Amino acid sequence: ALALVGPRDLLGRRVVVSAGGTREPLDPVRFLGNRSSGRQGVALARAAAARGAHVTLVAANLSVPVPPGVASVPVETAAQLRDAVRAAAKDADAVVMAAAVADYRPATLADAKIKKRGDGSTPALHLVENPDVLAELAADRLRDGQVVVGFAAETGDDDGSVLEHGRAKALRKKADLLVVNAVGDGRGFGTDVNDVVVLDARGEVVSAAAGSKDDVAHAVWDAVLARW
Ligand code: CTP
Ligand code: CA
């Protein structure tokens, strides 16, 4: 059994991980959401706890269970996630934003169920922008020496490769580390094989990993540990 016990190299560290996908309500029964399962964030929380860290998991609508030994704060919306992450981040040595945070939310929340019009006309959906939790954490620096980590799922397109899009995002967000995940072609979402490159705030590659979400999680903590 001892052979299964890895290094306790995060002992004494406090870390915050956000996971899952936010839901932005339209009315009491409807929301705008996304397909994030929370698996990568949960793997990060599990890996950190196994390495001895005190872990707070800000859990947005997970479809997988919270690992044992991990404190969790359930949230629904981007606004709730922001409040929970910032509260926990005040005394955290690292914050990893693995959650899929809605970029926009409905401008108004109806207090009763929106009825079908029935006259053939269609309603317009008005959206407003949500705060960028990661960019705020990187700008505000809630605690000295705190390592702020973001995730970016990217596909290549006519405007650039996965790495080029990742670099642009790293420069924009100013997080200490950005974990760029190549998605599409059967990689990333809904699978258990991931292909990541870890960039620093200048967009330089600091490490790369391929494998399960657990493998990626350990590679992320290795990169965080190297920054402390
Ligand atoms: N993120 C955040 N708050 C938001 C949107 C995103 O904290 N309102 C975080 C995510 O948790 C992730 C990182 O920012 O760690 C990158 O998210 P992503 O959606 O890839 O970045 P965007 O800037 O929203 O770019 P786009 O959706 O256009 O690719
Ligand atoms: Ca986004």
Image: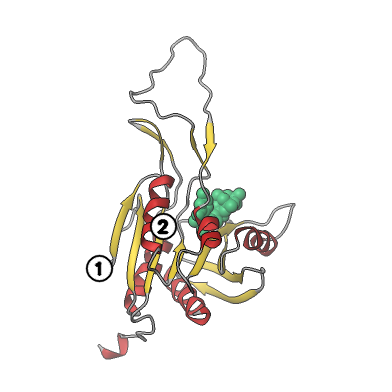
Inter-mark Cα distance, 1 to 2: 23 Å
Q: Relative to 76, is 119 on the left or the right?
A: right
x 52%, y 14%: residue:
121
From this viewpoint, which residue is outermost toward the bottom?
2
x 56%, y 64%: residue:
175
The residue tagged 2 is 86
Q: Which mark is residue 68?
A: 1
**Crowding at mark 1 (Cα within 10 Å: few <14, some 14-19, many 20+):** few
Q: Quadrant of residue 11?
A: bottom left
- Can residue 182 be seen here? The reply is yes
| Amino acid type indicated by mark 2 | Arg
Q: Quadrant of residue 162?
A: bottom right
- Can residue 66 be seen here? The reply is no
Q: Contact (CB < 8 A) between labels 1 and 2? A: no
Quarter of the picture containing the N terminus is bottom left
Percent of width and height locating residue 24: 42, 39
